[in-house]
Image (cartoon, grey):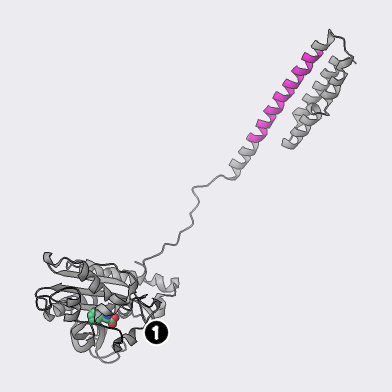
Amino acid sequence: MGLSEKIAALQAEALEKLKKLANDQELNDLRVNVLGKKGSLTEILKEMKNLSAEERPTIGALANEFRDKINFMLEEKKLEFAQKTLNAALVQETLDVTLPGKQQKQGTRHILTQTQEEIEDIFLGMGYEVIDGSEVETDHYNFERMNLPKGHPARDMQDTFYITEDTLLRTHTSPLQARTMDAHDFSRGGLRMIAPGRVYRRDTDDATHSHQFHQIEGLVVGKDITMADLKGTLDLVMKKMFGQDRKLRWRPSYFPFTEPSVEVDISCFKCGGTGCNVCKQTGWIEILGAGMVHPNVLEMSGLDSSIYSGFAFGLGVERIAMLRYGINDIRGFYQGDVRFLEQFAL
Ligand code: PHE
């Protein structure tokens, strides 16, 4: 058989095999077997050296033509396989948009946040500013400026986490009183602010105490602020939060940074004052501490206490929420148990 017949036979065989290819692997095998270094075409071409000079170009051209044809057809097959794989994947991954979706569980704002924001709204409505403070505070602002010099016995009740000797986690939101007064331009009038946030304190954790909790500080400073303003303000706020028929009771108390100082009780919103489990049979519920800003605190902020006066109060957000929603264990707020939290979903 001459070389041209051999090439023709090889071509016929290759085309036959090409038709039967099933996948990329077989396709590669065929390419190697026919066109590869040790493939059938290479073997045939080795015999070219026996040809005459006239025959050689004709056979060479024949061989090239065959190689191009096979290459082209292999390439076509390859594309066909790729398209098949893609089609199969498309069919498999079809998305049925009419199937019911998976319901996403939607969270809710934490009940403490809700309570805080509700109180903020009441004060915003009365023209107060809401001040954000830092939980890391200096001894200077947390104690000294609140009229609690080093060695003051009332510091004992407010031991806390110290970062350095002079830097600590604040024990109350009261340092915002001094900070706000420092920053305020009194030539433009008095100030009204509340400062909500987290505080830290030496406490034995139990059902009603936590070493970490939330307070809202309130401060009003101006030229004619009296205790009547404090009473009127708290009366309004407590009625908004616990019902219009609440009465307030004022008991003398002590805080180093207010003088006089008071502890404020509200008449029990559950029994109305006759005595029940919420008010521990007393008819009254202790709700916050307050007082007239101590002259020393005003003076330390550079204010003349014969001209300026003010009132301040501090209330516990947890306590308010516990009372309003009948929560009897403060730890529920912090444990992140969804069953607890979702009861307060809006
Ligand atoms: N800072 C006080 C406390 O944490 C609360 C308070 C604030 C009392 C402002 C009076 C005036 O107990």
**Mark 1 CB within 8 Å of ligand 1:** no
Number of other residues with Cα within 10 Å of mark 1, as a class: few under 14, some 14 to 19, many 20 or more: few
Depth check, front residue: 87 or 207: 207
Depth check, front residue: 338 or 20: 338
- Magenta stretch, main secondary structure, is helix
Q: Position of residue 102 (x, y in %)?
A: 49, 57
Report ligand 1 position as a quadrant: bottom left
Residue 68 covered by magenta stretch: yes
Q: Specify whether 234 is left or right of 167.
A: left
State whether residue 311 is above or below residue 87: below
Q: Which part of the image, by quadrant, shows the C terminus?
A: bottom left
Residue at (31, 87) in percent of width and height: 151
Residue 162 covered by magenta stretch: no
State whether residue 76 is above or below residue 96: above
Question: Residue 260, located in which quarter of the rendered image?
Answer: bottom left
The residue under label 1 is which amino acid type? Ala
- What element does badge 1 sit on? loop
From where the camera sits, is residue 122 visible?
no
Give the magenta-colored segment's residue range.
59-82
Q: Position of residue 178 (x, y in %)?
A: 23, 73
Q: Specify whether 192 is left or right of 133.
A: left
Q: Which part of the image, by quadrant, shows the N terminus?
A: top right
Would you name the residue on which mark 1 appears?
207
Q: Where is residue 120 in the image (x, y as percent from the top left)?
A: 25, 69
Depth check, front residue: 170 or 275: 170
